[in-house]
Amino acid sequence: MGNALTLGQMEVRFYDDSACLRCRCRHLMFALRETSAADNNPEPGRQYLRDTFGQGFWGKREGFVLLREWLAALGNTEGMNEWVKDSGGAHILAGRLRNDHA
């Protein structure tokens, strides 16, 4: 598992394929990448998800939080040291989404 790419190693073009963009997980990963790229400021990631899912965001929000919390735990998993920075961003973004209101 130590060979997993971190979000910082992924290129934005990885997400440009429309087939990839249909996958909710890809959107979540891209939002996390946006958070990490902004020095763990959760606003770009949150805004990306809100813009992407529109009104559907509110119905998916709790699922996003649960997945983000799982991703946040990766930084504490043996052999996943590459995820320490990104897991911190996931934790911050999960908190921001949990406390998001209309």
Image (spheres, rainbow, N blue to C red):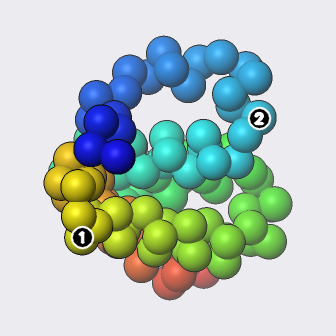
Q: Which type of secondary structure does the marked residue at label 1 adopt?
A: helix
Image disc number at residue 22: 2
Q: Nearer the viewer, residue 19 or 93?
A: 19
Residue count near mark 2 (Cα–Cα under 10 Å), binned few <14, some 14–19, many ≥20: few
Q: Earlier in the sequence, mark 2 or mark 1?
A: 2
* Residue 59 lies in quadrant: bottom right
Q: Is residue 91 above or below residue 13?
A: below
Nearer the observer, disc 2 or disc 1? Answer: 1
- Classify residue 86 as left or right of residue 21: left
Between the residue at mark 2 and the residue at mark 1, the CA separation in whole angstroms equals 29 Å
Image disc number at residue 97: none
Q: Is residue 53 above or below residue 6?
A: below
Q: Is residue 40 visible?
A: no
Q: Position of residue 95 (x, y in %)?
A: 42, 78
Q: Position of residue 37 (x, y in %)?
A: 27, 41
User: What amino acid does circle 2 point to?
Assistant: Arg
The C terminus, quarter of image: bottom right
Q: Nearer the viewer, residue 73 or 3?
A: 3
Q: Residue at x 34, y 63 (%)?
A: 74
Q: To which residue does mark 1 refer?
A: 76
Q: Residue at x 65, y 17 (%)?
A: 17
Q: Nearer the viewer, residue 64 or 71?
A: 71
Q: Position of residue 101 (x, y in %)?
A: 60, 80
Q: Which type of secondary structure does the marked residue at label 2 adopt?
A: loop
User: What amino acid does circle 1 point to?
Assistant: Asn
Q: Residue at x 43, y 63 (%)?
A: 71
- Classify residue 98 as left or right of residue 43: right
Q: Position of residue 6 (x, y in %)?
A: 31, 40
Q: Is residue 101 visible?
A: yes
- Classify residue 1 as left or right of residue 55: left
